[in-house]
Amino acid sequence: MNNPLFDLILKGGTVVHETGRELADVAISGETIAAIGAPDSLGDATEVVDVSGQYVIPGAIDMHVHFREPGYTHKEDWETGSAAAAMGGVTTVFEMPNTHPPTRSAVEFRQKQECAKKACVDFGIYALLAEDNIDEIQGLIDAGANAFKCFMGNTFGNLPSPSTGAMLEGFEIIAQSGLRISLHAETASIMAWRQSKLEAAGLNQPLHHIVARPEVVAIEAVARAAILSEWTGARIHVLHISSAGELRPLSEAKNRGVDITGETCPCYLLLDASDYERLGSVIRVNPPVREKKDSVAIWNALQSGVVDMIATDHAPHTLEEKTNDNIWKADCGFPGVETQMPLMLSEVAAGRMTLEHYVRISSANPARTFGLWPCKGRIAVGAHADIAVIDMARQEIISATKLHSRGKVTPFEGRATTGAPIHTLVRGRFVQRDRAIMPGVSGHGKQVTNIQSMPAPKPCNVDQSLAAVLATGEET
């Protein structure tokens, strides 16, 4: 072969976009897609990989993972977590701030950047919005935070939920950057009150977790956050939508023009309260898996666009931390970044959604929402060559022992899946090939840049923000 035009050609596959599909070859040069054309029309490449009969889709973008480093590396670290992502067809992750120490200032942010140098997939890093770090927010923005996370309800790490006053001031500051604020939208005071009553009464079975966190905690929190967003112009994102009730304030806020988006996770679509007896404490997650009516409503909202995307809340723990006869002593969450794509492709195979719609909710919408578009989230000339090649006929059985995460426990243990990513490429490089992690890929991942591609924030609806008044000493 003389003077090949490209580094790599994926030959003979069906390229799937969010609006359609085409039989095409995809050529890659360096880190980007250089050409897309009819089969055998693109010329020569240093390497040609035949993907005939398979589907070429944008790699999934998971906006919600916990890789546990620093501080909890017995549960996960950036190398094991990103390897699990690569096995799951995920090419970009956004990692949460409830590590130890939490990502609450520029100092901790830079510490996390060092940890992330082991990643084999691209990544964003969340900064924390809390009661006690309002003065750190601008420094976190300047340090390169990709988004902010606000824990309105308690979860792993026991970070105190900020008061509404602190949230409002934080929203005012962050709104000016255009960065999005992701919300664990549950009302902490209600949950603390109810759980303490249940514990005092000796009620500690798995289903009592739902009793402690009824859907009203999500309804109230989403409505309150949407009002703060509308008033300040801050962009917000509702994490792990679990209930039918919270869909109403989410939809109403969208209809009012609030820049609000939402995600759900496979556990809220594919499990319900009937699974608690079978799974015991393994199913414990915040917010909880709820009733069948909730999963049906969330499926409908995902189809209609009220819920914008799929994520995982990948939250690994050891088996010992997850299993306990007392539900209050079992850690919340489980791995998900490796199993999301096979689980959702199985729903595609079953006719519950199209592959095009899956591309929209797993890649295109996350990229647009968090400012990564047009570099990521699509198969197009000039975009990063972040690609999952999937075999829709491949059948597998989910097994915790085979997960690449350190968290060897999953509520989907033994579940049969149809469809799997057989290759994963990040910026043109195979990080997973033929269902195995490639050697030497640790450190290939890069932190994404998203501030420049975000549209200008909406004007603040207040005459002057608190920060501005405090800085000038003037009355509004």
Image (cartoon, grey):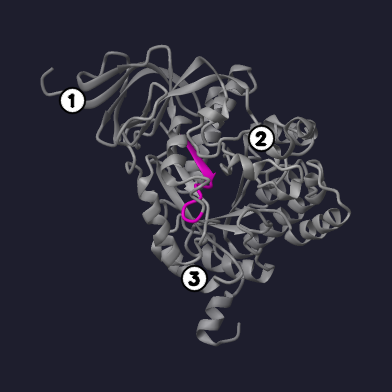
Decide which of 30, 84 is in the foreground and name it: 84
Quarter of the rendering containing residue 229: bottom right
Res. 136 mark = 3
- Secondary element under disc 1, as helix, strand or loop, is loop
Sequence-wise, which precedes: disc 2 or disc 3? 3
Residue 5 got which mark? Answer: 1
Above-or-below relation of 222 to 359:
below
Q: Give the residue drawn at x 79%, y 36%.
A: 291
Amino acid at dot 3: Glu
Using the rendered image of the protein, determine whether residue 345 is visible from the camera's viewpoint: yes
Residue that badge 2 annotates:
267
Residue found at x 61% / y 33%: 410
In the figure, 4 relative to 149: above or below? above
Question: SS at mark 2?
Answer: helix
- Alpha carbon distance from label 1 to label 3: 49 Å
Between disc 2 and disc 1, the foreground one is: 2
Quarter occupied by the N terminus: top left
- The three-letter amino acid code for the residue at tag 2 is Cys
Q: Residue furthest right?
A: 201
Q: Which residues are magenta?
A: 60-71
Which residue is situated farthest in the left direction here? 2
Q: Position of residue 457 (x, y in %)?
A: 51, 59
Q: What crowding class fits label 1: few (fewer than 14 Cα within 10 Å), some (14-19), or many (20 or more)?
A: some
What residue appears at the point 47 percent right and 52 percent down from the top-left corner?
69
